[in-house]
Each structure stands twice: as structure tokens, then as C-alpha cells.
Image (tube, rainbow, N blue to C red):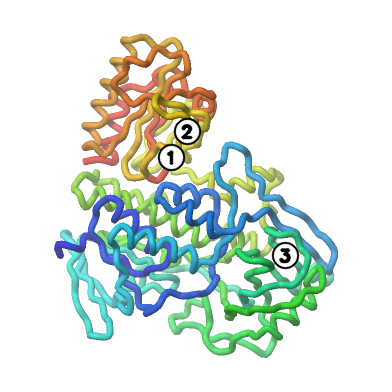
Amino acid sequence: MDDDTAVIIAGAGPVGLTAAIELRRRGVPCRILDPLLEPPQYAKAVGIQPRALEVFEQMGVVREILDAAIPLRGQLAYVNGEPDGRMELTLPPDVPYGFVGLPQYETERILRDRLTGLGGVIERGTRVTAFEQDADGVTVTSENGSGATTTRAEYLVGCDGAHSTVRKALGLSFEGGAFAEQYMLGDVELGWNMPRGYNIRAGHRTDGVVDDVLVCIPLPGLHRYRISMLLPDGHSGEQAGDGIEHGFATGWTPEISDLQAVIDRLAPEPARVSHLRWSSVFRISHRIVDSYGHGRVFVAGDAAHIHPPTGAQGMNTGIQDAHNLAWKLALAVRGDASLALLGSYDAERRPVGEEVVGRTVRSAREGIGADSTDPEFVLRREAQLLIDYAGSPIVAASPADEPAPRAGARAPDARGLTRAAVAFELRLLPLLDGIRHTLLLYADDTTAESDLRALEEVATTAIAAAHCHLNVYLIATPEAAADATILPLIRDTAGEFAHAYRAARRSAFVIRPDGYLGYARRAAATADLVTYLASTFR
């Protein structure tokens, strides 16, 4: 293997950047290759979900994201010029972040800066063209202006979009279809008095059938929106030659007058279109691969799944693909991964991709939440907070009577935690470094000194089983006699941890680096915990 290349990543969009950052954070040498000489400057994906913000918090970029973004407050819908519904994006208080809007090029800029700070470099003008893999590694061929070169690496990750070279060379199927409609997109300012921070969806309906549509998503800046609308007759974009009709088309580009005509026809109040920064024609397909990888080669993001942009699911799902894969690759590179670990990437993420593809297709036709009468459920699902990996080969099985949250679920946050020498209250999730697994042990008011010694023994055994890739905290009630412990001690002063985790005396929870519970038992046994850890660690 090349000394400076354990993993090669094809594609420097948000998915590839996430993979590279997470590998670099763990000290894994990687190269990220992208055929574009300059980063794109268009507002493709513009919505960032609450779950993605939790991921960004772990990655160390959430402050920069929030500084640059606009809070998304909800959606106002109109049909034939009349109000037709209002949705508020107000999440319950147990969720630390809301929905925000940010052009994809700004998200990528922030991620690039983070990667640069970790010593990473994007090799621009360089395209992965082929590869061969064997039991020991992958030989990757890439081309730039100077010709072709080959590099030997342990793993290859294709984050190279809907027309992925890596996916095609790996021989993965990409079944699905295309929407007949084509759309115009524009990054503009709209001179109107609609409330700030709301998506505006305006349609025209004839005999109960929607035959015209306008969607305006707010962006940072005064009166700035990314608008989308049906492409008018007489225009058509040219797609890539691989038969996958998804993404930006070449050829005709909409002008302000084209966008203004639709605004005049559908907007809920008069508005002047100005300051056109970018426009394009866009086609939508829905497809998913039959596997997220084979051997030492994997795909993530649009290379693995494409679908309608309804609900801003695409980029957010891809970022979480990369976040799920990177920590597993890092353990594999270090020789500390179990035989089942890399296979769990497909087992965990492909069902998520299948659900997102199916749901966004339904939502594009019927509207978000048309399949549910529970608005909180719909919001949590759109926020990607309900993803669950129960049944994964690296998630402990939960007894039938185990209360929620069970192993496989997203680890809830909790406020009101305190610790010695810290003056202010803490949240749970920022305690996790997002690099190692974290074992949380629980002590309540009935905990005796013998219980503390037993919990400490559990911690020592678990750390050894995880080859030291494990942090441990003792979470204790305010009155628990736990000051004598040698473990880092956190007090559940507000009681939110006990409530969120249904914690009882000697409960044990393992939170994975991607923020999901791998193990959750209210009456933990050391043997069970070690068995679980053996599913992840060599």
C-alpha cells in the first residue's frame, strides 16, 4: 500500500468531504479526488436536517454551519392563489437542533475548511477511471491533465454522484425510473412580503389535478430563495449519456424573464425576480443500488441512491452514509475491526436508502406527511431522527421487555448534566467525541460501594474488549454515593438522562461514534456487553 493512502475517495462533494474528514479525524491517511477544477457554486441541496446538524456537531463544524445558515420555520402552501395549509417546523424540546437552509456550495466550503485544518488536500482535476481489487487491497487508476496513474490503497469509496464511475465499475445495478417532468431552478431574490424563513409552495389545480407548481426555499440573505418550477413547453435539457436522467442538464438555461413568468402566474402575491445568481434545468430519477459495496469498494450518497429532492433528504442521507462508513473503515485500517463490521454498512444504510427513495417519490406525488395523521411523527421522520439499526449484525438484540430507547435507535440527547470543576450545565451529546464508542454506566440513589467497584470492573473489561477505542462515563443521580469512583463522573442533575434513557441501577448503554445505540440494557451483564463488543471489534 502507498504509505499515505489507506483509503481513496472519489468525489469532493459533501459526502466525500464527510468521509475524508471522519477518516482524517481518526488519523487514517486518505486521498480525495475530484474531476472538477473548481468547486461548484450552485445552490443544489439547500436544506440541512436536525440529524445532520448533530452529525456536524460531532465533526466540529456545527457553529460554522449555523453561522452561515437561515433557520427554516415551516411551509406555507397555496393552490390557485388561495391558502391551502401551513406546516410549522417546530420540533419537541428533546431535539437539540432545528431545520436550517444553506446553499450546498456553502456547506461544501465549510467542510473543505475543516478538511484543510486536518491536513487534507483535495486533488482537483483528477478522476477515478478504473480499479481492480483483490483480497489485500485496491489498485485505483486515476487521470488528470498529466495522464494516468495507479495507486494502491486498502479501500475505495465512490462518492462520485448519480453517474458514478465507481458504481458502474463495481457492476452494481441501479434500478428505478425517471419522472417525466423537467424543472427549472434559480437562485434569486424575490421582492415580496412573505414571512421570512418559510418555504412557499404554490400550485395550480384543474379538476382536482395539480398541473403547475412553484416551490421557493429561503436562503441566507434578504429575500433570497432557491426557486423551482416546471420547465415550460418548447425547452428541454440534455442529459448525460449513461441513461440516468438525474441532475443538471446542459443546453438551454433559464433567464430572469422565464422565472418571472412563473412567479407572475403562481406566486401568492406579486413579486419581482432579481439578482439571478445561477439557474439550470433539472431532471429527477429514483434509483437505488442492489448493494452499497463489494469487497473493499463502497458507494455512498447519490452514487448509491437518487430520488426527488422533496423534504431535502438527499444530501443529508448521503452525509450520514459517509458518517456511518468512515468509523468502520478506520477500525478496519487499524486492524481492530470484526469480520462483520464492514458488511454492516450495507446492512444498515441500504434499508435507509430504500425508505428514503420510496418516501420521497410518494411525497413528490402526494405531499409530505400524506401517509400519516401524526404531525410529530412526520417531523421526526423528515428530520431523520427515526432511523433505527435494530437487526444489524453489530447491534445487540434487545429483550422483548426492554424499554425504549433500544439498541439500534438514535442516542437521545439530555440536558442538565453537571460535573465537578465545570460551572455550567452540560448536554450529553457534546460529551461524546464522535471518534470512539462511549460506554455510559448508571448509578442511582441505591448504589452501594460494591456496585461502584463492579461498574469499574465492567468498564475495564469493556475497554480491553474494544482495544481502547472506548470512552466511559458514570452517570449518577444527584444523591448517588458515587464520588469515590475512579470513572469520570457526570451527575444527572436535571434527571433528563434517566428520563430519556429509562435508566435504572446498573444500566449500561454503548453509543457508537455515529450517535446510535449499539447496546442498551437496564440490567447489564458483563458477558452480554463483551459479546456485543466482539461483533464490532476484533
Tag 3–tag 1 contact (CB < 8 Å): no
Q: CA distance from mark 3 to mark 2?
A: 39 Å
Identified by mark 2, the residue type is Leu
Whether 457 is drawn above or below 20: the answer is above
Looking at the picture, how far across and down is residue 217, in whole percent?
Answer: 65, 65
- Crowding near the residue tagged with mark 3, few <14, some 14–19, many ≥20 C-alpha atoms within 10 Å: many
- Residue annotated with mark 2: 426
Identified by mark 3, the residue type is Arg
Whether 160 is drawn above or below 137: the answer is below
In the picture, which quadrant includes the N terminus?
bottom left
Tag 1–tag 2 contact (CB < 8 Å): yes
Tag 3–tag 2 contact (CB < 8 Å): no
Looking at the picture, how far across and down is residue 164, in whole percent?
Answer: 39, 72
- Residue annotated with mark 1: 430
Q: Along the horizontal axis of the image, is 535 left or right of 390?
A: left
Whether 516 is drawn above or below 489: the answer is below
- What's the residue at 44%, 43% (across, down)? 389
In the picture, which quadrant includes the C terminus?
top left
Q: Secondary structure at mark 2?
A: loop
Q: Quadrant of residue 211?
A: bottom right
| Label placed on residue 201 | 3
Q: Along the horizontal axis of the image, is 178 left or right of 230?
A: left
